[in-house]
Amino acid sequence: MGERSFIDTNILIYAEATDEPVKQRAALNCLRRLFETATGVLSTQVLQEYCNIAIKKLKLPSQHVREQLDMFEQFEVVQVTPVIIRAGLDLHQSRSVSFFDAIIVATAQTAGCTVLLSEDFNTGEVMGGLRIVNPLGHA
């Protein structure tokens, strides 16, 4: 799997999901593979969403979240810019994609990714040259 792959927030969240052991294992294996092949890409938006969910919903300790951020920084991290936000707004208006999901797609495209790893999109769909893949085990 040498394709540059954009990692959506839900992959990071499922890596923490002890109550979903099958999805957790799939998420951890996916992240490990992307790290080992240096093909994983994240964005500042994904990291912010991860922190928000990890603290508020999963109630993880701040120190744990900081340690995870240190690990996630080993991936390429793309800064969400006004140019990306405008591209996301265009996508949101032209496709039936939520605004924040459109920013994810626009960021992945800007980063030159060919795969978007997510549970939130239609697996197998291609959006602007970006192939949607759900690595968590079900299509």
Image (cartoon, rainbow, N blue to C red):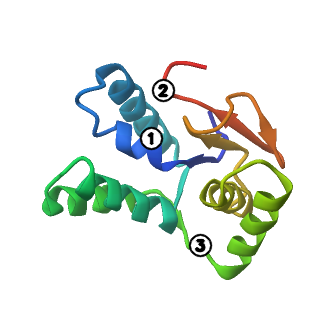
The mark nearer the N terminus, 3 or 1, is: 1
The mark nearer the N terminus, 3 or 2, is: 3
Name which residue lies at 50% across and 65% down: 45
Name which residue lies at 84% across and 49% down: 128
The mark nearer the N terminus, 2 or 1, is: 1
Quarter that holds the N terminus:
top right
Q: Which SS class for mark 3?
A: loop
* Residue 28 x %, y %: 36, 34
Q: Are marks 2 and 1 in contact (CB under 8 Å)?
A: yes
Q: How far apart are the alpha carbons under marks 2 and 1?
A: 8 Å
Please name whichever residue, 59 or 16, is drawn nearer the observer in this view of the structure. Answer: 59
The correct choice, above or below, for 26 with respect to 94 in the image is: above
Question: What amino acid type is highlighted by mark number 3?
Answer: Val
Question: What amino acid type is highlighted by mark number 2?
Answer: Leu
* Residue 21 x %, y %: 29, 22
Q: Are marks 3 and 1 in contact (CB under 8 Å)?
A: no
Asked which quadrant contains residue 47, the reply is bottom left
Q: How far apart are the alpha carbons under marks 3 and 1?
A: 19 Å
> Which residue is tagged 1?
11
- How many neighbours does mark 3 have within 10 angstroms: few (below 14), some (14-19), or many (20 or more)? some
Q: Are marks 3 and 2 in contact (CB under 8 Å)?
A: no
Numbered label attached to residue 80: 3
Q: Which SS class for mark 1?
A: helix
- How many neighbours does mark 1 have within 10 angstroms: few (below 14), some (14-19), or many (20 or more)? many
> Which residue is tagged 2?
136
Q: Which SS class for mark 2?
A: loop
Question: What amino acid type is highlighted by mark number 1?
Answer: Ile
* Residue 119 x %, y %: 54, 35
Q: How far apart are the alpha carbons under marks 3 and 2?
A: 26 Å
- How many marks the image carries: the answer is 3
The correct choice, above or below, for 22 with respect to 74 in the image is: above
